[in-house]
Image (cartoon, grey):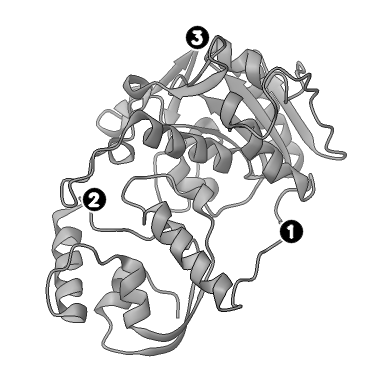
Amino acid sequence: MVMTAFEVGESEKVFDLLLVDEAHRLNQRANESSGVQNRKFREITETLFGSDDTSKTQLDWIKARSRHQIVLVDAAQSVRPADVPSELLEELVGSARAGGRLYPLMSQMRVAAGDDYVGYVRRMLGGGHTSAFVLGEAVHPQDFEGYDFRMFDSVAAMQAAVRARDVEVGLSRLLAGHAWEWKSRGDRAAFDIEIDGVQLRWNSTQTDWIASPGSLEEVGSIHTVQGYDLNYAGVIIGRDLRYDPVAGQLFVDRGSYFDTKGKENNRQLGVVYSDEDLLRFVRNVYAVLLTRGIRGTYVFVQDEGLGEYLGRFIPRFGF
């Protein structure tokens, strides 16, 4: 059986075993995407625990509805404030480690660049003082043999490269962070992303967007590609993520980040998210987007400072 967390919570069964994929995307109590889901969250919690305990998360539902759980978790792929908090995930991992039940997955099977690539991307997006790379050291782009990893100075050139790869091997798409408003949602004739004369629209569907008609001409968001594989990904990094060369650090431009749920404070729990909190989510978004491509990843960066910084780690090539 394949079920959502809400379906598990509403079930009257107690399962022998639940295998929880993407457990870092389970929700804590927050403002859900609809009033119906807000009501369900309250009702499920009341049914399982006897009262509307706002400290309970969907992970608590799963534990209450199953005797055993196998939980696949990666806190670095949490991309919204409504996701279960990192502190809870740390407690989960710590408890599993103490009980001899922690099994680290030491290799990744998606990206043909090898096991070092995912860590390289995450360290690269750490930025400056928070990076595993020492600030000021001479850094040269790492060569991932057999993997096409490069930065473009033109989004038009990157789009042409993605189209060419799609003709060759298929499953090649443009992706982007939430640095543009979704105008086409209310006006199908409107364009959402405009860069140097190139006009693009966000994904026209949330359901299996990658395989949908017209997706090659659209741009996928994090919510359409997390958990999916592509042969080639062309990633547009907008001005929501920027770099301060004086401080030597990445920073988030809150005014250029348009995922409403991605920066919404949690009124239910009385939590206000700082720019540092938001930076963690935005970095995670781009780390996920940059690890969708099996054969290659192309990158275009809007912010000049960030482009210069990332140019230390990503080879620059024309098409």
Residue count near mark 2 (Cα–Cα under 10 Å), binned few <14, some 14–19, many ≥20: few
Residue, disc 2: 33
| Residues at marks 2 and 1, CA–CA distance in whole angstroms | 34 Å
Residue, disc 3: 197
- Residue at 72% of width from left, 35% of height from top? 165
Task: Left or right? Give the position of 78 relative to 270.
Answer: right
Q: Examine the image and state in which quarter residue 3 appears.
A: bottom left
In the rendered structure, find residue 182 and report the number of the disc placed on it. none
In the rendered structure, find residue 107 and report the number of the disc placed on it. 1
Residue at the front extreme? 98
Indicate whether 91 appears above or below 253: below
| Residues at marks 2 and 3, CA–CA distance in whole angstroms | 34 Å
Q: Provide the secondary structure element on which disc 2 rests.
A: loop
Residue at the right extreme? 145
User: Mark 1, mark 3: which one is toward the viewer?
Assistant: 1
State which quarter of the image contains the C terminus: top right
| Residues at marks 1 and 3, CA–CA distance in whole angstroms | 41 Å
